Amino acid sequence: VSLFGMDRTTYRSQPAVVRVNCAGNCALQIAQAVSANPGRVVWVEGNATIDSNQVLGSAAEPVTLFVRGDLTMAANLQLTGLLYLHSAGGANNLAVNAGSTTVIGAVVAEGALTAAGAPTISFDAAVLRTISQTQGSMVRVPGSWRDFAAGS
């Protein structure tokens, strides 16, 4: 609630959230969901493995990737945005078994985070600010809101 302003179930139920059901390798499903839905949160339900080289997001179009389970990398992954890990058991596992993993933005875990391998995580406030201002079901368009009478 403190990070997203609502509980996890409500956040997942937003119309803008794209869901990916995963059971093992889902690198292509995640990449397709991110590519086809820029500016939308991608929610991965289940333990996910990324076994092919992927570049997800950029500074101009960062990604919010929410994984409800463990995330394992078996290839090179570069993610620009927010990686959020939630495991029902309270232990959030981020494993890099092969290749290199770089996250530019932030990694957040509910509970304990166990990082195996050598992921590179670089905090980037500008990337997180872009996510905060552009992603979600309802985003205010600059200049579109007035709560005063015209001409006053």
Image (cartoon, helix red, strand yellow):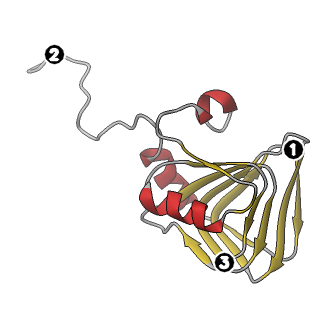
Answer whether residue 1 is visible to the viewer in this image.
Answer: no
Quadrant containing the N terminus is top right
Q: Amino acid at mark 1?
A: Gly
Residue farthest to the bottom, as pictured: 99
Instruction: Indicate which label's residue lies in the foreground, 2 or 3.
Output: 3
Mark 3 surroundings within 10 Å by alpha-carbon count, few (fewer than 14), some (14 through 19), many (20 or more)? some
Figure quadrant of residue 114 = bottom right
Callout 2: SS: loop
Q: Which mark is residue 52?
A: 3
Q: Secondary structure at mark 1?
A: loop
Location of the C terminus by quadrant is top left
Crowd tier of the residue under label 1, counting other residues whose Cα lies within 10 Å: few below 14, some 14–19, many 20 or above: some
Q: Earlier in the sequence, mark 1 or mark 3?
A: 3
Location of mark 1 (residue): 111
Q: Is residue 124 above or below residue 117?
A: above
Within 10 Å of disc 2 (Cα), the crowding (few <14, some 14-19, many 20+) is few
Q: How far from the left and from the top, in percent, is residue 94?
A: 82, 62
> How far across and how far down the image is residue 92, in percent?
85, 52
Of discs 1 and 2, which sits in the foreground?
Answer: 1
- Give, as a three-letter code, the residue at label 2: Ala
* Residue type of the residue flagged with mark 3: Ser
Mark 2 sits on what residue? 149
Q: Marks 1 and 3, Cα distance to the nearest angstrom?
A: 28 Å
